[in-house]
Image (cartoon, rainbow, N blue to C red):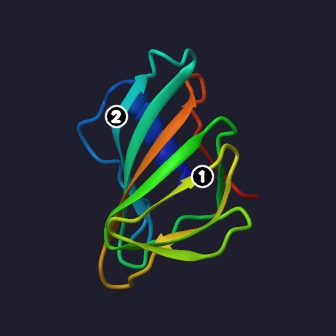
Amino acid sequence: MNVRTLITAVGAAATLALAGPVAAHDDHAETVTPQFEQAIPNIPGKSLVALEVVYAPGGVSPAHTHAKSAFIYAYVVSGAIVSKVNDGETRTYKAGESWSETPGARHSISRNASATEPAKLLAVFVVDSDDKILTTPEN
């Protein structure tokens, strides 16, 4: 995921500015739109954050890691997403399929499988409430 876009999206979610999408930086990136953020009442210090990620045709996210506290559930809403997390295999997930990512996971591959059609996923984070930076690019 584009880190600047994700940070902007999370900041917007934190202030409950859920109305509009966050623009991608180029034609081959993704657009991240905050959908939901709320503290989990029966798990003190934890929040649930949901982001919609739309990849343009051929869209690619740079390699990144997630917050050390973040457990992530990713669900492909439409199209197909190619993903590789940690030392796992590179897989293509189609609409209706999902995967999870453990806290501190390294996401080396995240891209649209199609060069001609967009793809969309919903990323749901269970994260420490004070973790506002959910994604950090690899150096």
Task: Report if the CB atoms under discs 1 and 2 are less than 8 Å apart.
Answer: no
The residue at the far left in this view is 19
Residue drawn at (39%, 29%) of the image: 37
Residue drawn at (45%, 21%) of the image: 40
For the residues marked 1 and 2, what is the alpha-carbon distance in whole angstroms?
19 Å
- The mark closer to the camera, 1 or 2, is 1
SS of the residue under disc 1:
strand
Q: Which of marks 1 and 2 is nearer the N terminus?
A: 2
- Write down the quadrant of residue 121 in the picture: bottom left
SS of the residue under disc 2:
strand
**Image side of residue 51 versus residue 19, left or right:** right
Point out residue 29 in the picture as x, y percentages from the top left corner.
Answer: 44, 66
Is 25 placed above or below 93 here? above
Q: Name the residue under label 2.
A: 36
Residue drawn at (60%, 64%) of the image: 62
Is 76 placed above or below 33 here? below
Point out residue 54 in the picture as x, y percentages from the top left corner.
Answer: 35, 61
Looking at the rendered structure, the kind of residue marked 1 is: Glu
The label shown at residue 120 is none
Q: Mark 1 points at which residue?
A: 101
